[in-house]
């Protein structure tokens, strides 16, 4: 069986949980298929960081440590990944389900004439034919998708497999890309990054508010809850459209797709577009005055009541719990 190539995104030279999750996922596919789990790292990542991938089943890393690739250039990245697939005779290519993957994976698919399943939720159910599960209809149903092309491309939905340690001896090999200089067309003039906050894509816990909070002046108790729990802040689309909260906090089908371990939907009715973006959360806690609100169909725990009255009680309870533990 051919090998598995795992594209490992880095963030300022460091890997995050999602990267170790796809390493674990790719390593398990390689194990079942009788191949080797090989990681591809593009950008300036130190060897000590690359070696961490060996804790999750990766046996070799191809490192493109070149200043040209510090900034994401979709066409160039896609070319490098396609070159690595051909070099390592990889039959399966693994991505995270991320904004970068949305931009790069389809281009790799075209270059390699490879079938692609985006946001797979588990290991292949069969290798002949190659069949993988994923959610469809905004998470309301599951589908088994068959890929018939010789090369298969998968992105893994966040938190759908988990981080699994499987320590292997790992080698690091410099990979010299043949990408033409003409592929680098973007010039980054300035970068501004949010600091002092838990980022949505990295958050284990997300506290999200909706129109039930009535206005931006009522957000302080929700911010307090986020601080108590070390959570990221989020909101529904109507809230960001009204300017109550920044658009960067908008989660849902038309915003950021998130999959935390714990998601609080506070004063959110649960439009289908919102639920589609948060349905992969492991546990959803909802608070709403309407007991027939759609959010309660998706919630694991629900409280029917006024969120402005319940939030202070939640804050008090969580503060007391943290003080005692």
Image (tube, grey):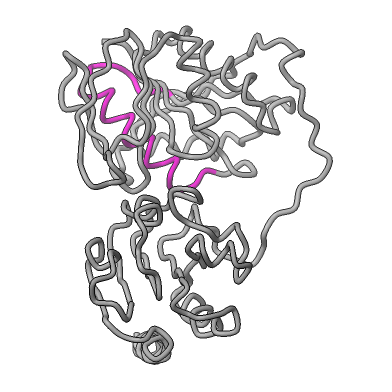
Q: Nearer the viewer, residue 63 or 224?
A: 224
Q: Which residues fall within the magenta stretch?
A: 15-38
Direction from residue 37 to residue 175 in the image, left or right: right
Give the x, y percent position of residue 178: 65, 9
x 64%, y 31%: residue:
43
The quadrant in which residue 65 appears is top right
Q: Is residue 60 magenta?
A: no
Q: Nearer the viewer, residue 187 or 87?
A: 187
The quadrant in which residue 289 appears is bottom left
x 27%, y 39%: residue:
136
Quadrant that contains the C terminus? bottom left
Q: Main secondary structure of the magenta part?
A: helix
Decide: is 212 above or below 254. below
Decide: is 40 above or below 14. above
Marker count (numbered): 0
Give the x, y percent position of residue 258: 42, 53
Q: Is residue 33 magenta?
A: yes
x 49%, y 52%: residue:
201
Q: Name, please, the residue furthest toward the right.
A: 189
Give the x, y percent position of residue 254: 49, 48
Q: Nearer the viewer, residue 66 or 222?
A: 222
Direction from residue 254 to residue 320 in the image, left or right: left
x 53%, y 78%: residue:
223
Give the x, y percent position of residue 147: 27, 17
Quadrant that contains the N terminus? top left
The quadrant in which residue 66 appears is top right
Decide: is 294 above or below 25. below
Q: Nearer the viewer, residue 28 or 165?
A: 28
Direction from residue 59 to residue 50 in the image, left or right: right
């Amino acid at each position: 069986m051919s090998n598995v190539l795992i594209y490992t995104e880095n963030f300022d030279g460091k890997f995050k949980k999602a990267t170790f999750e796809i390493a674990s996922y790719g390593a398990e596919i390689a194990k079942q298929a009788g191949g080797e789990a090989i990681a591809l790292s593009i950008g300036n990542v130190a060897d000590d960081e690359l070696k961490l991938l060996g804790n999750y089943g990766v046996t070799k890393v191809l490192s493109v440590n070149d200043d040209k690739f510090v900034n994401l250039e979709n066409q160039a990245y896609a070319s490098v990944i396609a070159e690595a697939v051909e070099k390592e005779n990889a039959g399966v290519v693994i991505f995270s389900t991320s904004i970068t993957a949305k931009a790069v994976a389809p281009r790799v698919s075209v270059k390699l004439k490879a079938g692609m399943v985006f946001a797979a939720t588990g290991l292949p159910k069969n290798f002949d034919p190659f069949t993988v599960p994923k959610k469809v209809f905004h998470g309301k149903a599951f589908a088994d998708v068959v890929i018939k092309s010789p090369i298969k491309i998968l992105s893994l939905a966040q938190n759908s497999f988990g981080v699994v340690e499987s320590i292997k001896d790992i080698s690091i090999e410099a990979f010299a890309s043949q990408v033409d200089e003409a592929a680098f067309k973007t010039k980054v003039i300035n970068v501004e990054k949010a600091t002092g906050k838990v980022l949505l894509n990295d958050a284990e816990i997300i506290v999200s508010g909706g129109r039930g909070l009535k206005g931006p002046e009522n957000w302080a108790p929700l911010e307090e809850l986020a601080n108590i729990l070390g959570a990221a802040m989020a909101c529904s689309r109507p809230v960001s459209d009204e300017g109550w909260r920044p658009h960067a906090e908008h989660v849902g089908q038309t915003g950021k797709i998130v999959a935390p371990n714990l998601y609080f939907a506070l004063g959110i009715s649960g439009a289908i577009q919102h639920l589609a973006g948060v349905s992969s959360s492991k546990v959803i806690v909802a608070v709403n005055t309407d007991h027939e609100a759609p959010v309660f169909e998706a919630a694991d725990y629900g409280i029917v009541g006024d969120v402005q009255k319940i939030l202070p009680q939640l804050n008090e309870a969580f503060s007391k719990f943290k003080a005692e533990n």
